[in-house]
Structure formats: C-alpha cells, structure tokens
Amino acid sequence: MWRRIAERYLGDPNGTANLVRRVLNDYARPHWTRYALALLLMAVAAAATALTAYLVGRAINETYLNRSFAGVAMVAGAAILLFVIKGLCSYGQAVTLARIGNHITAANQRRMVDTLLQQSLSYFADRHSSEFTARIGLGATAPSHVLNMLVRSFGRDALTLIGLAVVMVIQAPVLSLVALLVMPPSILAVRHLNKRARAIAQTEFAGGMRVIEVMQEMIQGLRMVKVLNLEGEMQRRAAGHIESIEHAANKLARVSNRSSPLMEALGGIAVGLVMLYGGYQVLLLGRPPGEFVSFITAFLLAYEPAKRLARLNIELNSVIVGVQVLFEVLDLPGDAKDAGKPPLRLGPGRIEFVDVSFHYRANLPVLRGLSFAAQPRQVTALVGPSGGGKTTIFNLLLRFFDADAGAILIDGQDVTAVSRESLRRHVAYVGQDVFLFRGSIRENIAFGRSDAREEDIVAAAEAAHAHEFISRFPAGYDTPVGEHGLQLSGGQRQRIAVARAFIRNAPILLLDEPTASLDSESERRVQQAVARLSEGRTTLVIAHRLHTITRADVIHVVEDGRVVESGSHAELMRARGRYADFYGIQFGTSEPAPPPAGAPLVTPRTVA
C-alpha cells in the first residue's frame, strides 16, 4: 500500500510532491537558518495571539468575579505588551521572508539568463520571445512563493490555530466540540480569493518589469549577441538590473510592512482600554458580566488561519505551475558540444565549404552538397533566388547551426572542431536588419570590441561615414538610439552597424544585403563605408541587387541549395547562364549595366 501511495505522489517528476521536495532541497536548505528565525518569530506571534484570547477571559474574571480594578489594569497592560510583541514579530518575519524571497528570485533570474544564453538558435526557432518574458516573470518568483506559503501555513496558521484551540478547550470543552463540527462547512463556504492576491500580482509586476525588458531585448537581438560574443556583456547588464531590483524589492518589503507594529500596538491599546472600560462599568456601574467571552474571542481569531489552511492545497497547486516553468528552463542542457575545443588559429582567412548539406526541418533540405571557396583578401558574392540557401551559409559559418554533412573549413580547420567564441571573434557581420541595443550610440559602436577607447569609437564612426551625423546631435555620441534603434533612420542605423564592424577589426567580413532597404543617398553612403571596410579582408556578401557586386572578385550563384555557377561578373554575363538571367530580369538587358553613381557596395581588394 505504501508503495502505491509513494508511486502515486512521487512517480511524476512534475508532480506537486516532487516539485515541492525539489524546492525544499534547492532553495530552503541554503537559507534554513533564516527560515528558522522566521518560524521562531511566527511561533512567538502565534503564542501572543493565543494568550490574548486567554487574557480576555482573565479580564472578565478580574472584573466580575474578583471585582479588582488593579487586576484588570494588569491584564490590560499585559494585552498591550502582547500586541506590541506580536507586531514586532510579524514585521520581523515578513521582512525576513521577503529578503529570502527577493534573493531567490534574483538568483533564479540570473540562472535563467545564463541558461538561455547558452542555447543555440535552433532552440529559439519555433518559440515566440514573449514565452521567455512570461517564464522569467512567473518562474523566477515561484519557489519563494511556495516556501513562504509553506512556512506561513505551519509557523503562522497551524501554530496559531493550535494555541487558540487550547484556549477554547480550556474555557469551554463542550463548545469546542461543537465548534469543530461547525467550522468545516463554514470554511468550505468561503470561495472568494483573498485581497492579498491583487497586492502580490502588483508586486510581481513592479519587480519583474525591468528584467522582462532586458530579457526581451536579449532574445530579440540574440543573433547579434552571439555574432559579437556579447554573452558576457549581456550577463553583466542583466546582473546590474537584477541587483537594483533586489534592492528595490527589499525596500518595498520594509515600507509595506512598516505599519504592522504600529497597528498591532494601537490594537493592543484599544483592547486594553476596552478592558479598563468594561471593568469600570462592572465595578462602578454594576453591569452584569457576559459569559464565554474568552471562548468567542478565540473562536473568531481561529477562523482566518483555519480558512487559509483549508485552502492551502488549492493555492499550492496554482503556484507550483510557476515552479515547473522555472525548472523547465534551468534543466536545459548547456552547450556541451563546445566544451574543451581549441580556439581557431586564423591564417590568411581562406573559407571553404566542402559538399555541405543541411536542413532546418526533416525532409526539407536547404543545402544539398554545396561547395565553394572564398579566397583571402577578396570579395566573394553569393547571389540567387530567395530561399536558395544564401543566409543559411552565413548561419553555418557562424555556427548558429551545424551542418548535417560535409565540412566548413577556415584555413583548413573544421569550424565544428574549434570553439564558437574564437570563431566569432574573427568575424564581423553587417546585415540588412540592423539590431541596436537600448543605450547610446557610443555603447552600440563599442559593443564591437570590449576594450574600445574613445578615439577608437570616433575613428570607427569616421570610417563608416557616421561621425558627421552623430556630431549634429546635441548629445553627440551619448545620443540614445531608442528601442531597436528606432530613434535613428535606416541609413544611420546601417552606418552605426558598419562602425561596429570597423571597430571589431575582424579578418573575416560577412555582409548580408546591408543596403537592401535604403534610399539612394543612404545607400551611397553605406556603400562607401562598406567598400572601405572590406579592404584586406576575406569578404562574403549576399546580394539581390546585382549592381552592388559587379566588381566582386568571384560571384557564386546559389540555387536550390547548390552552387550552379561561379565566376566574375563579366565571365558570368558571357556564359549567359542563370546569373545573366537574373541580371536581365533586374535591368531588362543581357548587357552589363554601368555601376551606379558613387562607390559600389564592394570592390575587389586583392592585396599581394
């Protein structure tokens, strides 16, 4: 029988019993001394509550039986003292539990950030970013809610109920039995949620709002975070926000519970005055005493803790969902594939794809035995129809994903055999969808290199033709870019991205149609900046606007996951193959068109 019971409650790893056991092991054990202090304070408060109910009966006896005003005064003073002690203990346990909970929440938020940064892009491919916003908002706080619920149920409600029950039995044993029969249906009749639920929801929102903002930005910009090796920077930025939230939450706990000692003391004074007034009326005015006052007092005081205990299981099961959400993230495996791999030893920077195959979804291949080479200090262009696999080539080169078959080599080294961090350190990336992080222009340029100095930032901006428009802003390089850089124009965002690539000074440059969505003037400026950026580097560029790559050293036509043509612009035009078809569609001619006004996007920079 016991075996079946154990299997029923402990067989499911996501069951309430197992999740509660894990919460106790992972979070209660490290803080057991502070939880013990909270329980001790709760026990003192429970004893004070029970003694208060007892003192009511003592006050009646002193008033109506002994007719001693001095005795009544002593009982009143004792009641005031008990309420003051209870208020101080309530304040102490509330702040203690809040501080433990805030620490647990902050630690969970840091762990969730670290765990998500270790995941590959494939993990996020079929998930919406709002999922992670909800997870960190709900999951990070769930363990502390569970522990606080358990501690308060035992330390406050159960102990208070036991103490009051003792008083009830002492004062009226028979009525105590009647109360036990009446209380359960009264408890079951209570169906409304406590008003505290709204206050808890408001506290959760206020405490998690800024962390959710950081998480949303991190997930949306994950590609750029990984390209620029910004995992450490994201961790530092998130940790700074989390620390400030923890401090604010601790302050909120102190302020919100500050009224407890005062209100309890005032309540004690009120009870004492009532006792004094009742004694005065009995002794001096001859009013008759009332029976069962102590019992009724204990019964009324016992109602609330009994109701909370009856609802414990329902509330625990509602909160445990957040614990499951948290552990689903924390239990994600880290990037074990990269552990212990040597760094990339970069030479001239030759890139080679050898019979590479890859698919995102089963039975839907994107690359089918693709092979080509990009020579050092040359511009290699990839053109072809959308969906042919050009962007996938960049994804595999940066190791957002690993190829299913074949090899990707840099200076003869397989990219899967070296660490991702060292690989991405040697790569600069500029795409058509520029992601700027919330902050200033200076910060966004400096993300390209962690040790960048002010003169490096300015030099990069000048090289990217961005210094001129930055200088026109009243705040200059301290100008905030807004969320996703929306306070800047498309051309300005692109030039900041080029400046970020300049300051990175990486020997391999990846360009993913960086002028696709720009007007003519902005395109000309970005073309000039990118042409200068590509000097002396191994440059791979994806292009749909063919006039931007007519002077590339080599053009590869990628179609249906394969390279179907290769050569210079002139050679491909003479061959009158797929490239010539694409060119004719764009320009309405099979003859070479003259390059547009201004410098082209990329030019061959073959250096001996």
Image (tube, rainbow, N blue to C red):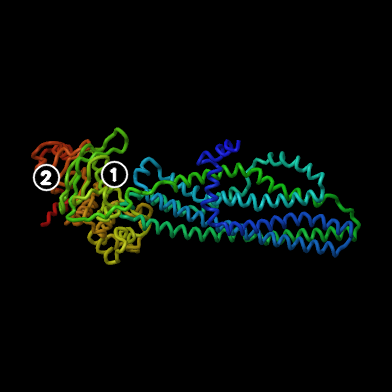
Q: Position of residue 248 (x, y in %)?
A: 52, 60
Residue that numbered label 1 is attached to:
402
Tag in front: 2 or 1: 1
Location of residue 99 (image quadrant): bottom right
Q: Residues within 10 Å of mark 2 (few under 14, many from 20)?
A: some
Q: Amino acid at mark 2?
A: Ser
Instruction: Give SS at disc 1.
Output: loop
Camera sees residue 515: no
Residue 486 in the figure: left or right of residue 304: left
Q: Residues within 10 Å of mark 1 (few under 14, many from 20)?
A: some
Residue reaching furthest right? 286
Residue 90 in the figure: left or right of residue 247: right
Between disc 2 and disc 1, whose residue precedes? 1
Q: Are marks 2 and 1 in contact (CB under 8 Å)?
A: no
Location of residue 456 (image quadrant): bottom left
Quarter of the figure that contains the N terminus? top right
Camera sees residue 67: yes
Q: Residue at x 26, y 61 (%)?
A: 467
